[in-house]
Image: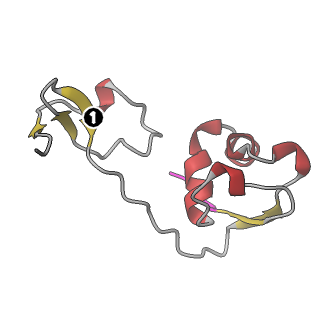
Amino acid sequence: MANTIEHTDLTTNSFVNSTSRYVDSSVLYYGDLRRLTFSTYKRGTYPDNSEDLFTVIPAGMEYRPDKMSELAYGTPDFWWKIMEANRIADIFNFKAGVNLRIPANPF
């Protein structure tokens, strides 16, 4: 039997901050225990921009896209945008020596 999904009137701003990838998601109740969850996140696309930055992941930032986000944007919160822009789905593929595009505007 499939788990039930029930839509709520709750907004995500009660649960995540404005930089979260779930900020535009719906809040749902899931299953018989009505656990709170978000609707499925769909990865964004990041068209090339002439203001994008390009770099190589240094050894000190291997597996740490949050550190790269901190360096590029002044906050670790946009690590997921760097991962998406480079089509890196797994943190273990964020390795030293990999060429990386940093989107110009994460907002």
Q: Main secondary structure of the magenta part?
A: loop
Which residue is drawn at the image coordinates 62% and 56% (left, top)? 82
Image coordinates of residue 83 in percent, x first then y, are: 61, 56
Q: Amino acid at mark 1?
A: Thr
> SS of the residue at dot 1?
strand
Image coordinates of residue 14 in percent, x first then y, are: 30, 24
Occupied quadrant, residue 5 = top left
25 relative to 42, above or below: above
Which residue is drawn at the image coordinates 80% and 48% (left, top)? 62
In the displayed structure image, the side of residue 91 where residue 9 appears, left or right: left
28 relative to 43, above or below: above
Of residues 42 and 17, the one drawn nearer to the viewer in this rendering = 42
45 relative to 30, above or below: below
Which residue is drawn at the image coordinates 80% and 64% (left, top)? 98
Q: For the N terminus, give its image quadrant.
A: top left
Of residues 97 and 104, the one drawn nearer to the viewer in this rendering = 97
Q: Is residue 59 magenta?
A: no
Q: Is residue 105 magenta?
A: yes
- Sort mark 1 into few (<14), some (14-19) or many (20+) by Cα contacts within 10 Å: some
Residue bounds of the magenta highlight: 103-107
What is the tally of numbered marks visible in this picture? Answer: 1
**Which residue is under mark 1?**
37
